[in-house]
Image (cartoon, rainbow, N blue to C red):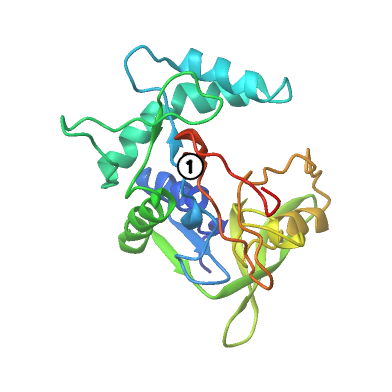
Amino acid sequence: MTTPRPVIVGTGIAGLWTAWRLASEGQATVVVTKESLADSASAWAQGGIAVALGPGDSPSQHAADTLAASDGLADPEAVRILTSEGPSRVYELLALGARFDRGPDGRLRLGLEAAHTRPRIIHAGGDRTGAALIGCLAQVVRCHPLIELLEHTEVVRLVEEGDRVTGVAVLPGSGAGYVLRASAVVLATGGVGQLYAVTTNPRVATADGWALAHQVGAQLRDIEFLQFHPTALKLPGVNPAPLVSEAVRGAGALLVDRTG
């Protein structure tokens, strides 16, 4: 019988990063996605990554800006982790082959966006940051001998034994369903935008993780705090709505609706 391995559901940046981190420590893993490896909301992200790397900037200043923008609703510990570990994560991405945009001097180009007091937004390929990072991490995951990838395979339920989740029931795009035993299950299934009439999320963002977790009695916390991208084009019959990058407003553009 095969030894149970961690199963990661979802192939956005969170899922791919988790798979790589586990594999880099010698842990064999299984990654499951209901579409192809490249299909995720992460691949659509345009605006870049906020990280305190520039002169005069610091993780503490980044944290202060983030808390101020949250109007007191952010979890301070989560903000601390995000801002203090951000620089290290970017250096790890660079080591994996990620190519961020650089200025003529060879240094990372830092942009300024709304709510930030310092230029700290890094991009890859201009407004293709998400796609560039997914491309990098997807290559790492595909080539790693300790990572098994199951594409076009949907997780339909979590399998329980007593009070523990011990596997996932999967349904391949072709063939019969089966149970995949797991030593741990990571739900990295991304967004829920397709639950709404208008969204900038891709069609795969259907709240699968919420449903799977809820079925086994997990508490869904703060699900009302959804981030809707602030700028998009609402066009008749177009789903998802085309996104307008935050960099547009950061550069000083004024966006207007049909009434001007």
Q: Is residue 217 above or below residue 253?
A: below
Q: Residue furthest bottom?
A: 175
Seen at 33% across and 37% down, the residue is 92
User: Residue 37: percent from the left, percent from the top?
Assistant: 46, 66
Residue toward you, 36 or 239: 239
Residue toward you, 162 or 71: 71
Q: Residues within 10 Å of mark 1 (few under 14, many from 20)?
A: some
Q: Is residue 225 left or right of residue 2?
A: right
Q: Is residue 38 left or right of residue 67?
A: left
Question: How many marks overall?
Answer: 1
Q: Tell me the residue that label 1 is attached to.
A: 248
Q: Is residue 118 above or below residue 97?
A: above
User: Residue 160: percent from the left, percent from the top?
Assistant: 75, 59
Q: Residue 25 occupies which quadrant of the picture?
A: top left
Residue toward you, 153 or 70: 70
Residue toward you, 125 or 21: 125
Q: Is residue 50 above or below residue 153?
A: above
Q: Residue furthest front?
A: 260
Residue type (three-letter) at the residue carrying disc 1: Val
Seen at 32% across and 60% down, the residue is 139
Q: Residue 176 occupies which quadrant of the picture?
A: bottom right
Q: Is residue 134 above or below residue 229?
A: below
Q: Could you tell me which secondary element the residue under label 1 belongs to?
A: helix
User: Residue 86: percent from the left, percent from the top?
Assistant: 44, 29
User: Residue 177: percent from the left, percent from the top?
Assistant: 65, 80
Seen at 44% across and 35% down, the residue is 251
